[in-house]
Image (cartoon, rainbow, N blue to C red):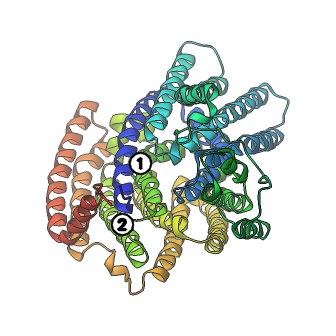
Amino acid sequence: MQTNGAAVLVRGFVNLVLSQITVRLINFGLNLVTARLLSPEAYGLASVQFHLLNTGIVFLSREGLKRACQRIQKDETVHTSKVLALASLCIPLGACVTGAVCTATLWSTSTDDKEAQVQGTAVVMQGMAAFLELCCGPLYILAKVQLADGVVAVAEAAAIIAKGSLTLYLLKRASLPVAIALSWAQVAYAGVTTLVFIVHYLPDFYNWVRSPMSMPQAPFCPSKQVVLEPQPTADTAADAELRRRRLTGTAGAVGASDSGMHASPGNPGVALAKECLIDSGSLAMCWRFLLQAGVHLLQTEGSRMVMALCQSSYNQGVYGLVTNLGSLVVRTIFFPVEEAAFRAFSKPSSAAGKGSEGEREQIVGVLVRLFGLVGLLAVSFGPSYTYVLLRLVYGQKWSDTEAPRALAYYCAYITLLALNGCTEAYVNAVADPRQLGQSIRWQTAFSAAQILLSFALVWRLGAIGLILADSANMVLRIGYSWRFIKTRASGLQLRDWAPSLRSCAVCALAAGALRVTKALLIDKHIRDGTAEFAFFRHACMHIGCGAAVLMVVVFVMLSSESDLEHQTRQLISHSRPHNA
């Protein structure tokens, strides 16, 4: 069977979306109830401060190693034990990161009052929860490399249910401070995640203990120990060349393919002895992706850092609600596409040379055009319905804050997030080590500019200023990725990936029409302060107008983007397995 990029993209996207929908819907429901129970100040503690602490530790310790292992797996001869050996580095790395982050946080909040002591206890518990989650990091990375999205989805869904249920119980029944209750819930999340991965891989480990040499091709086979230096064997020309490459650091992801060349059925230990599971090339790649993970953390969470430093807990809660609600679409649809695209670009294509590169360019072009159309719909319809959404779902407590206006700006931002995700997936998957280093340097500069712009805008515009700074950063990153793609695809023009003029025009008309209906039906109600039932009736009328306009817009888009429809169908047809 041959594996092409389109097949990996389509299968990966379907699996990830199906798994994410269930997880995100559960998470949304639990967050909704939690937001209704908590004040904006308490919600800011959970969605900004604790989120930064936990996400920072886990992301810095695990994400770079995950990306590196996925890149190493491009070589289909690489054994599972090599991936697992590299992935295991997240445990000692996580211990160092956890200690450093928790120490810095405790030092910055060191006071003698009772509230600070509760906060310090919560910080320690959050750090313990993050490290507990990292203890199953090698198994998580292994599942990602093996495309075992089912076990990842089950672990996340079970952990979210445990966390949300315990949060609601402790907030309603127990007399614990909010910070401690949220921290116990995070510990439960980490414990359930670790338990699910251990239970999933325990049968394979048990079989290996019973018969170490009977599972050379098993999905989980730690039958090879981590060998930092190969055992001496008889010298051959290939052996001398392999040693020279390792000493000069140009061996890359050598190991299984080189060692297997001299293995013999009568001596199965030869391949094991010669395989170097952690070599200099693999460590160098891990280091590059770890640096990139740090930069990416600044890019994605820099706004929360600025918000935590400069704004009150009330504003932090408003910003946290907007980002959590906006990220529902990002994590359910756009993140699975980015993950599947990275897998598709990283896997060897069915063709070689220019044919392989052309397939990748076609995939990224289709994704950019699709996301552009989705973005047009979000920008056209989203701002007219943010107040209605928050009023109906979260209540007037939240709809009367700055959240509706901030969420309107976020509708445009998530489009930039989606475009950046698929273009950067291409860059990270096909760039060589020199190009990856250059990308990291540019992204570092973009992140620094984003942080400075965030500090400048947050004082005047609050949460909206942070969203604008994030949007500027996304534009810079998309521009860099576009420049990289153009170097590999000569003759590519921006109009090749842009929506048609008819699609843009009909979306602009739709946005204007919906602004009028919002002014007549919703804004008038807000000014007059009519009863809740009257608002519900007006909101239903406004939603009905939007549904009618949406059908017209979709019809025009389908007739205007017929070439995109043809390319999408072509990719889906190519995704079906075919014999070599």
Mark 1, residues whose alpha carbon is within 10 Å: few (<14), some, or many (≥20)?
many
Residue 521 lies, with reference to residue 456, above or below; the image says above
The quarter in which the C terminus is drawn is bottom left
The quarter in which the N terminus is drawn is bottom left
Mark 2, residues whose alpha carbon is within 10 Å: few (<14), some, or many (≥20)?
many
Residue 180 lies, with reference to residue 295, above or below; the image says above
Residue at 80% across, 67% down: 247
Q: Position of residue 306 (x, y in %)?
A: 65, 54
Q: Position of residue 335 (x, y in %)?
A: 45, 51
Q: Is residue 303 visible?
A: yes
Residue type at mark 1: give it: Pro
Image quarter of residue 134: top right
Residue at the spot of label 2 = 363
Frontmost residue, 537 versus 153: 153
Q: CA distance from mark 2 to mark 1?
A: 35 Å
Frontmost residue, 329 versus 326: 329
Residue at 52% across, 69% down: 430
Residue at the spot of label 1 = 404
Q: Position of residue 40 (x, y in %)?
A: 54, 36
Circle 2 SS class: helix
Residue at 39% across, 39% down: 19
Frontmost residue, 225 versus 487: 225
Image quarter of residue 98: top right
Frontmost residue, 116 versus 429: 429
Circle 1 SS class: helix
Residue 259 lies, with reference to residue 349, above or below; the image says above
Residue type at mark 2: give it: Ile
Return the disc, 2 or 1, that comes first in the chain's sequence.
2
Q: What is the number of the mark on residue 374?
A: none
Position of residue 531 in the picture relative to residue 111 (left or right): left
